[in-house]
Every structure is written in structure tokens, then in C-alpha cells.
Amino acid sequence: MFNLYSKYLRRVINISLIFSLTAFYLLLSVVPVAHAAALTALSDTMSSSKITTASSHVLKFTTPTGAAESTDTIIITFPADFDFTSKTISTLSFTHGASTGLETTETFAANPTGSVWGAVFSGTANRILTLTAPTDGIGIATVAASDKIIITYNSTNSINATTPATSYAIAITGAFGDTGTITVYLITNDQVAVTATVNQTLTFAISDVTIGFGTLTTANRRDATGDTNGQTTEVEAHNMTVSTNAASGYILTVLGATLNAGSPTITALGSNTASSAGTEQFGLRMDNSGGNGTVTAPYAASGYAYTGTASTAAQVAASSTSSFTTTYSVRYLANIAGDTEAGSYSTTLTYTTTATF
Amino acid sequence: MFVYIFGWLGTPAAQAYFASSTSFGVQHQLNSIGGRSTSTSFSLFHAGGQTANTQATSTNFYGLAGILKFLFRPTKPSYEQTHYHWRNDDGSESAATSATSGTQDTALSSLAKSTNIRLRVEISNEGGTRWVYATQQFRLEYGLLVSSCSAISSWVDVGAVAGDFDMVNTANLTDGNNTTNIATSIGGVTDSNKTFLTSNTAVKDTSSQVGALSVSSDSFVELEYSIQALSAATDGGIYCFRLTNASSATNYTYTVYPQATIASGAQAISFSISDNSIGFSTLSAAAATYATGNLAGSASETEAHNMVASVTSNNGYLLTVQGATLTNGGYSINAIGGTNTASAVGSEQFGLRMTATGGSGSVTAPYAAAGFAYAADASTASQVASAAGTSSNTTYSVRYLTNIANVTEATAYSSTITYTITGNY
């Protein structure tokens, strides 16, 4: 019986001690307790892996513990040779959140306040960045356990180390208790230069180089035809096709005198003018189809014109850009007056295409 | 929980005190009366008393004479995980050495994966045997520490298939043998109770659960498990361990949790580009052109350069490309975009495709198929390849295609493409 009581008494004493220890623990529980854990999902996405080159760093990691105490710090330490001299905290960003890490953006100042994280560079070439939690431990939002954290250095004053084909370990430590390492690799040149050439092209063709009006009369208009007989209604005498890959396109000009029989000539139309039977007129008009080329005034309207001379070219069409094939349909008109000298009239018109590359 | 102790100075009544609840039992003393009664929720003990008003003590007990009334928890068992010790798998149960320099209750700081380690855990019944007392099948479980071991909500049987840990059969142990009460210096633990349960079958290397054991209120047992961290274990992760009764933690108290930190995987990453200058030479609207390392271009698909990547990391790497399409000032050759597309002569196309050999890296769509694609631009990177875990060298053969139209502006085109590898740890 005494043994039983003795056992129970020991239990009573033990329970009392447990009470006391529990109370003591509760009193101490206001003191924050840090728990160390390994960071997970670590990475550093760099804009360049090239040595001695400015590169941004997007440091990502997940903190099992969080950083919710005012005493918490997160310390990023780059290895030797990385150079952050003159880098300022304005070139940093700090976001965190449960899902993507982008949910909350914290702000930095040299010293932490109730809502702002402290951010200070230190060490050789500013390789150490110490982030200190806000004085309320919260900031914009608490860095909770399992939060994803993204700390970004932009490329300003962020110069890669100098040794190629080398791994460099970036350490993440701090009073928040979690630790981790991110290894990056630098090479001499992370770029591939690609070159190519597109040669210049310009194509130009005239479908028929001999056309004719036949016999001109004062009573009716005459329109040139490819069979040289002419007719009294508008018709395509020939066409021209032009294409080019010239970046600034091309111009198409015509050069040549009006119809003449030596000294006698048939007056050329200086502006776009409708056919007028019984009046001396020599002119042409054009339509365009396909590509980017267009007929130039005064040859684009329904009337006719001819401003070229034996010595002066007149622009009849153009494209301001490279162009697939444009087909120009060319129509020629001739009218004579009652006093137009009899004779055999002719002219040779020269079309020229000039591309601007 | 309340405890009352007081002396009864008068002559006790036949029924001095009686109380019951769902959470405690009552013992009351009546002279020369013994016995007990129980229910599903409490136990009532009667015991005879002695003459009142005296007290005696010794180093072993307290003797209180008088009428005592104790109000206390029922004497159900309390299996306390009181001590642990990591041991090297370098000898028999009695000969192996401590993995923590002979100090018990010390976490293992760097546990290599796929390496045998032995864990000795002590369970002591700090309660009783009067209530819900039954045999126990001590099972070893683990959980990844986040904030504290006690906060772990998802415990996993070490003996479960796959996972982060597994039991490992070792020639140094025979599953089902008895553990002995070895010295702390070689991996034993401090005795937490009066009696070491010698017939315990608690040496385990092929399964994580010990056969049924009765651990009485004055007893403790030491159980030793041979385990391994598997490749899936988190590098640098801290794992906690506990014993349960075949997954039930009812009546278990964890004074200590064995802890082990997985060795941080030695991170390593490498990357190279075989040629930093490639060219198509003269493009044609009449035929496809493929870039070559000698800048002359080719009318048939060919490797322009290759890239070799490797990583030691459970989470592998990403390989991205960034840069504008072929451009000269305001003129450019259309990039194919994010869809794998066959060569189409006469239409502007700039794209690339890749093949992968070696390692576990693979080309990412849309760059993996027979056609070509180019989804990056000067400010946006596009993933071209990746590895999901540790990978030896993967060689990526990169092929570039360009087609032009008749109207593609005549000029010299160029682009600078940046390839970046990012290790994921």
C-alpha cells in the first residue's frame, strides 16, 4: 500500500513540476523562436551568363519558415568577383506571396520602419545585401511560412564575375533562419551572332515594244494597239511589269519626244486631259494591278497626258517600298486637227525603272 | 488538471470522498478498505489507510500517513519518446558506433542520400497500465520539418514504398533480434525508466514496425532501425522522426524528435556554346537557307552550333533563348513564332529547332518537332530546353532556318541571340 501511495505521490510531484515548467514556458513564449530550415525551389534567372557583363538577377526561393519577426534578416551574398559597386537599393525589388511570389511588393529604405524593409549593401563591391524586416515584422504583408520570395537585381551596376566556365554559389542566409545556395555558371560568351544577306533585285519588262495608231483622223480619236493598226476606243497598247526588293521602292519614267514627222509634231498633253477629236493631242494613261506600285499623276486619271520630252524623263509610276510585281497597262491616245501636217509620225519612248535600295 | 493533497484529521466516514468525471479518477482512502472499480471513463481506486498525522520519507519513497485524497489522471499508459541516438551502420547492434560522437539526442547534421544510417529510439511508459493498456507495434515515421517537428502534420511510414526514406537491410543487423541496453558512448541512450524490456524484437532493418510489445509502467524499450535517405529526399531538408503504434499516436508523447539534415546536394551546373558566330550568307526567295558555322549557309538542314548543358540538382535547369529576329534597322524577317512550322519557301520565316542527345535534358516545344519556331524577341525569353532533375551532359544540336519573300528588303540582316541556363535547386 505504501508503495502505491509512494508512486502516486511521485506522480503528484511530477505533475506539479510539469505545471511549473508549463507556466515557465508560457512566460517565455513571448520570446520569438527561430526555426532553421532549408530553402526550396531556388533559382537565379540571369539576363546574361557572360563574364564581366551587366546582368540582372531574379532570385527565387521558398521559405519554409517565413520572416515575420522584426529581428529577421535575409542576407544575399554573391561570391567574389561579382561587382555591385555603386548599386543602389532603388535597383532592387522584393515580392513575395503564397502562390506566385508576386502577390505582395515590399518597399525598401536604408533603415526599416513599420512598413518598410531595410536594405543595405555591404562588403567588397557590395556583394552582400542585407534585408531587415520592418519594425512591426509585417511590412506590406507578412512573409509567411512557405511564401515564395522573389528578389530582383536589375542589371544596373550588376556586373558578372570574370572567370569563364566557372560555377559561382550565391548564399542566402539571415536571422530568419532558412538557408540555401544558388549556383550559377558563367561563360565567355553566351551569345550567338547570326548574319544573313538578301541581295538586291529589280525586275522590269515591257510586253510589246512596237505599237501603232494606224491612220489618224480629225473625226475620231485613235488609240494605239500592239498590232500597230490602232482603233477608236481606248485599249491597252502594251503593259509593263516591275518588281523589286528595294526597301525604298522604285520609280518608272518615260523619256521621248511626242509623235513627230521630222519637224511637224503632234502636240503632247501637258496635263491629264480628256480626248478631244479634232485637236492635236498625244498622251498616255496607265492602270496598275498587283504589287505596291501605283501610277503617278498626271497619268493615273481617266484623261491622258504626256510630259516627257526627248531630253526630259517624266515619272509615270512608282512604289515607295519593295514590291511584288505590279503590272502597268499603258494606253496611248492621238488626235489631230484639221491643219495637222500630213506625214508619217513616230516616236521612240524609253521607259526606265530605277530602284532605291 | 488538479491535484489535492490534504490530511483528514478526524475519523473518516465510511464513504469519505467520491467524485468522477470523464477525464479523471478519484482515489479515496478508507481505513482498511481496498479494491477498485472502473468504467469506460474513469477508474476508482480504494485503498486502506493508516493511522493519521504521521509522515515518513526516505530516498525512495514518501510515506504519508493519514487520510489522503488524490485527484489525478487515470493510470493509462503514456509512451514517451524520451531519447534517441544516431548510429553508424558499422557493426552489430552491440558493436556499432555513435554517429554523433557518443552524444545522444543530437541531430544528424549532414546525412548523405543512399547511405545506411541507424536510429535508436527509446520509448518509456511514463504512465500506467490501468487504462487502455495494450501491446504496441512501434513504427518509425518521418516528416519534413517546416517550422517544428511537433507541427508536422503529414508523417510517413519509413517502410512505405518510395518516399524520402526507406528501411535498408544491412548485414550488421538481423531484423527481429532484440536490442540490448548498450552504452551511450556507442549509440545507446539514457534509461528513462526502471526496467529495460529485454525481449523486444526491436532490431529492424527490413520493416519499419516492431512486433507487438507490452511496455509496462516501469519499463522502457530501445528500438533500432536501419534506414536510408532516398534520392527524393530534399537536399538540405531537415527531417523529424517519431514512433507510433502502427501509425496511431494516441497516448504518445514526444519529448524529443530525432532530426537529420539531408546533405545539401553539391550544386553544379555547366553550359557551353560551340560557336558564337553563325550565318546564312545569301538568302533566297526560291529556296530555304540554313545557317552554318562557317557563315556560308546551306540549302539543307544542318547544325549551326551546339550547346552542352548539365546540372546536379533535383529540379534540373531551364535553357532559354532571347533576341530579335534577323533585322536591319526597320527591316526584319518575320519570326515564325510559337508554333512549330515547316519551311515554306517564298515566305518570310526565321526559326530554329533543336535535337537533344545524352543526359536527361530535352528540347521544349515548339522547338522539338520537325518544323521550326522562334517565339523570343529582344525583350522576351523563350524556353528551348530543360531537364527535370540532375542531368549529365545533354548536347543540343541547333538548326536555324530562314526563308524570304520576293519583297523581303535587300540588305544585310543580323541578330544577336542570347542563350541562358538557369539551375533550379
Image (spheres, grey):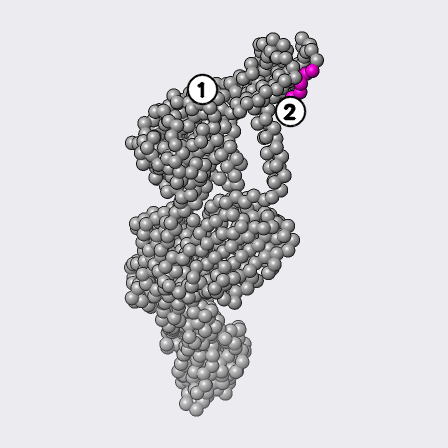
Amino acid residing under circle 1:
Ser
> Does A280 sit above or below residue B403?
below
Q: Quadrant of the N terminus of chain B?
A: top right
- Residue B115 image offset from top left, x and y in percent: 34, 39
Q: Is residue A231 magenta?
A: no
Question: Mark 2 and mark 1 in contact (Cβ < 8 Å)?
Answer: no
Per the model, the C-alpha gap separating discs 1 and 2 is 29 Å
Camera-nearest residue between B302 and B23: B23
- Looking at the image, is B307 positioned above or below residue B162? below
For image coordinates 43% across by 91% down, the residue present is: A263
Q: Which residue is mark 1?
A: B214
Instruction: Check disc 2 and report its element: helix, strand or loop.
Output: loop
- Nearest the viewer among A271 and B124 is B124
Disc on res. B20: none
Please identify the dominant SS of the magenta region. loop
Q: Nearer the viewer, residue B12 or B50?
A: B50
* Nearer to us in this view, A233 or B307: B307
Q: Is residue A342 visible?
A: no
Asked if the magenta segment contains residue B4, the reply would be: yes
Residue B113 position (above or below residue A72):
above
Determine the chain carrying the residue at label 1: B
Eye-nearest disc, 1 or 2: 2
Looking at this view, name the residue that lies furthest to the right: B10
Query: Which residue matches tag 2?
Result: B2
The residue drawn where x is 36% and y is 67% is A196
Q: Identify the magenta region.
A: B1-9
Residue B364: horizontal and vertical position, in percent? 39, 50
